[in-house]
Image: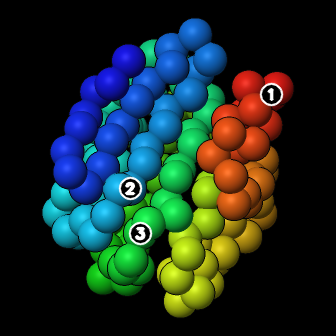
Amino acid sequence: MQVYDSESATVIVYPEKKIVYHEIHKYISDQEFRTVLSIGADNFIKFNCTKWLANDRNISSTYVEDIGWYVEHWESRIINAGWKYWAVVMPEMVTVQMFVSKFINKYKSMGIHVRAFSDVDKAMTWLEER
């Protein structure tokens, strides 16, 4: 079920699989990225999801200034709602890969099962098997 769609991003919820999926298509502003994460979190909670698939292959900015917002308004919401699994399709830009890797390590240390992928179909399969 598609819950958000723009030229820059899409958010889809698979209630039967307990998965929220977001895909970044091209450059996205920090405000729209917040919108994508907020809509995803709202639906994660609404449908009692436990898995998130982030297709961030085309993300081109790290939004470092937004880290506090992520922690307070996205991360805490989905962790409290029962987040267990995160599959992330890694960004193509090396600088953004390094930024995402910090979050991968953080979430792993918090007990969330995290795996990085280069292929969205393999990422989805991994989540579906959980």
Residue 114 in percent (x, y) is at 74, 53
* Image position of 56 with respect to 99: above or below: above
Instruction: Please report contact status of discs 3 and 1: CB closer than 8 Å, yes or no.
Output: no
- Which mark is first along the chain, 1 or 2? 2
Residue at (19% x, 45% y) in the render? 6
Q: Residue 88 lies in what quarter of the image?
A: bottom right
Side (left or right) of 113 relative to 28: right
Residue 37 in percent (x, y) is at 34, 48
Residue bearing the label numbered 3? 59
Query: What is the three-letter code of the residue carrying label 2?
Result: Ile
Query: What is the three-letter code of the residue carrying label 1?
Result: Arg
Which disc is residue 24 wearing? 2
Q: What colour scheme was applied to this rendering of the protein?
A: rainbow
State the separation of the CA atoms marked 2 and 3. Answer: 6 Å
Side (left or right) of 81 relative to 3: right
Which disc is residue 130 wearing? 1
* Image position of 91 with respect to 51: above or below: below
